[in-house]
Image (cartoon, rainbow, N blue to C red):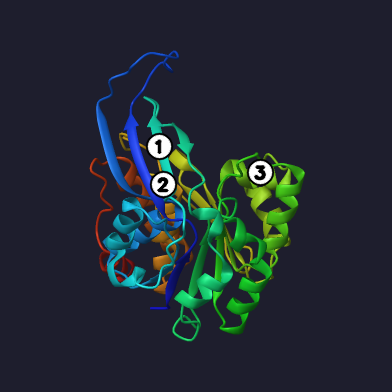
Amino acid sequence: MRPLAAIGNVNVDLILGPAKPWPKAGTEVIVDHDELRVGGCAGNSALAWDSLGVDYAIAANVGNDQFGAWLKEAFGERARDWPVEAVGTTLSVGITHPDGERTFFTTRGHLPLFSFDEVRSILDGERLRGGFALLSGSFLTDALTLAYDDFFDWADAHEIAVALDTGWPLDGWTDANKLKTLAWLKRCHCALFNEVETTTLTGNSNTAEAARSLKQRMPAEAIVVVKRGPHGALALDRNGTEFSVPAPPVKVVDTIGAGDVFNAGFLAALAANMPLEACLRTGVIVASEAISTLPRSYGKPLSAFLQETRQ
């Protein structure tokens, strides 16, 4: 098993819903469920790795309040060296809707202060040598994002393959955000984007062609993955061979963090040297389980997927 690490945004998610229609100002709405949980792209992926029973490291920061202490407690020893910033912890309130979609209200909080120096102080590059680093939350971790070139240099020096999932930009996919993302992908070994992001970044409305266009902008050996929600996922391997797997039909409870959970399942399987198609299937199954359960669960451990692959 190759080493795994998550780097990026860990924050608090308060999930409420479903809500329909959107309430008028000055009114109160009663919803059926609520859940307070660890969130953020890196946090969601790490929780899934916990459930899958795989070892990993995680680099993040927190605020100097009770929420920050709660987040560190959730990750135990792995969060021992997380820096505590002199601001409140980022809180994201997610309002779910009957169709499974959601609306977020998020505070800036501690995330913009997370820096490359802090990442380097948390992670042991030698222990991660030859592994995978999931880099996420690019448009929220301002200080770290400004130092991405330094981060990529550090990863290259330790032969760490970077898998990038930027998340959706707060100001949308402007030309500037597209150019920045495409520049980052030139340094990455794996792209983990959803269908809309992939087609928007490349300007190609055909998903498979857009994936190929993205791969052409990355290192020759890079893997491109496109997460397609209810339609499953597709990927191009290092040689450009295309693989696709469908998603099982499930009753959706909430889709918050679905892509992050997919990332965890996919990369765990990749780190275990499973075939690419099996990696896709693992990510899809784990994400499908997560979005259809309350409280959220992630299904069987990675060892069960490995056993199925060997049969």
Alpha-carbon distance for marks 2 and 1?
13 Å
Q: Which residue is mark 1?
A: 93
Badge 3 amino acid: Thr
Examine the rendered structure and indicate whether residue 84 appears above or below residue 13: below
Q: Is residue 37 depicted above or below 9 in this figure?
A: above
Across and down, in percent, residue 147 comes to: 65, 66
Q: Position of residue 187 (x, y in %)?
A: 67, 69
Q: Amino acid at mark 1?
A: Val
Q: CA distance from mark 1 to mark 3?
A: 28 Å
Foreground: disc 2 or disc 1: 1
Earlier in the chain: of badge 2 and badge 1, it is: 1
Within 10 Å of disc 1 (Cα), the crowding (few <14, some 14-19, many 20+) is some
Residue tagged by mark 3? 199
**Mark in the foreground, 2 or 3:** 2
Residue positioned 54% across, 58% down in the render: 113
x and y percentages locating residue 151 in the rendered image:
61, 72
Indicate the secondary structure of the residue bearing disc 3: helix
Give the SS element for disc 1.
strand
Nearer the N terminus, badge 1 or badge 3? 1
Which label sits on residue 257? 2
Q: CA distance from mark 2 to mark 3?
A: 20 Å
- Mark 2 neighbour class, 10 Å CA radius: few under 14, some 14 to 19, many 20 or more: some
Q: Quadrant of the N terminus?
A: bottom left
Q: Position of residue 263 (x, y in %)?
A: 45, 57
Residue 47 in sight in this render: yes
Q: Of the residues shown, which amino acid type is indicated by label 2?
A: Gly
Q: Observer-nearest residue: 229 or 53?
A: 53
